[in-house]
Image (cartoon, rainbow, N blue to C red):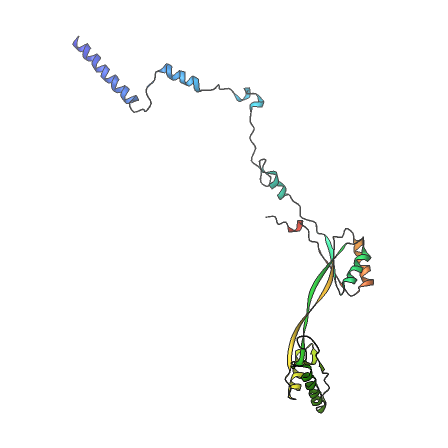
Amino acid sequence: MRGAVLGLLLANVLFATWVFLQYGRSESPLVSAPHALSGLESTTTTIGLLVEAPAESLVPYAQLPAQGEASLDQPQSLVDSEAIPSAQSLTCMELGPLETRQLADSVIASVAPDVVLEVQARTQLLPSVYRVYLPPSDNREAASARLEELRAALAGQRATIETFLIPRGVLANGIALGLFSEQRNAVNLKEQVEALGFPVTIKEEERQEELFWLVSQPFDSEAKIDVLRGTLAKMAPTVTLLEKLCQTIAQDIHLP
């Protein structure tokens, strides 16, 4: 009897040790099997084969685009921007220079309505000129006396130099000796007059002029270009006719 009791006690100790080793380190409390099965049933949805599911309940996924093709999810604006064709080159004409606005308007009227032209006024720099003169005197009487003195000195040297009194402007009461396109000629005259005892000044003057150019709208036929050429041959044969690309919005688009 005592051996049986000791055997049962030893069995209980071993069972308690086995239970502790199996579940003693788990953070979750031990639940009974019926409770575990009931929790599983409450959280698990029904599982069925894919072939048994209705077609309207399936959600298709887009395939990855092949190399060089646009993605199905890509914004339409990006696709269109990459497919923009290159702008077609259009022909325009530029002609000039025309010396007067009146001549430019006459050419426009002669080719209308076949050709549409626009007038553009442009300032063109000209070569400088060199003015040679004696500085202004204090008054008109003094300036006249100096002019007579200068002419007498030039006559004594048998020099033929045109001189005259400057009547108005910033150089009023001065004595003009000439206007030269080349600086060396102005310097030679200055040295010649200064040798006679008169102070001489050289002033470089910049010049510019306004000329007119005509710029056409894009031509849609070669016949209209021939109309323009024929008109210029009659009215302004010396002008230059240049062909160039028209400025359009499409030409300003730079694709990456």
| Vertical position of residue 58 compared to residue 143: above or below | above
Q: Nearer the viewer, residue 141 or 178?
A: 141
Q: Position of residue 98 (x, y in %)?
A: 76, 64
User: Is residue 226 shown left or right of residue 151?
Assistant: right
Residue closest to the far left? 2
Q: Taking 132 as reference, is 233 above or below it?
A: above
The answer to whether one can see residue 146 in this image is yes
Q: Check the image and report above or below for 176 versus 48.
A: below
In the picture, which quadrant includes the N terminus? Answer: top left
Q: Nearer the viewer, residue 14 or 136?
A: 136
Left or right for 75, reference 229: left
- Which quadrant of the figure has residue 161? bottom right
- Residue in the picture at 69% in, 88% down: 149
Residue 165 at what x, y percent from top left? 71, 81
Residue lying furthest top:
1
Farthest residue, direction bottom: 156
Q: Position of residue 127 (x, y in %)?
A: 68, 72
Residue at figure coordinates x 21%, y 15% from the top left? 10
How many numbered discs, if any?
A: 0
Q: Residue at x 40, y 18 (%)?
A: 39
- Residue 22: percent from left, percent from top: 30, 21
**Residue 227 visible at all:** no
Residue found 38% across the figure and 17% down from its top? 36
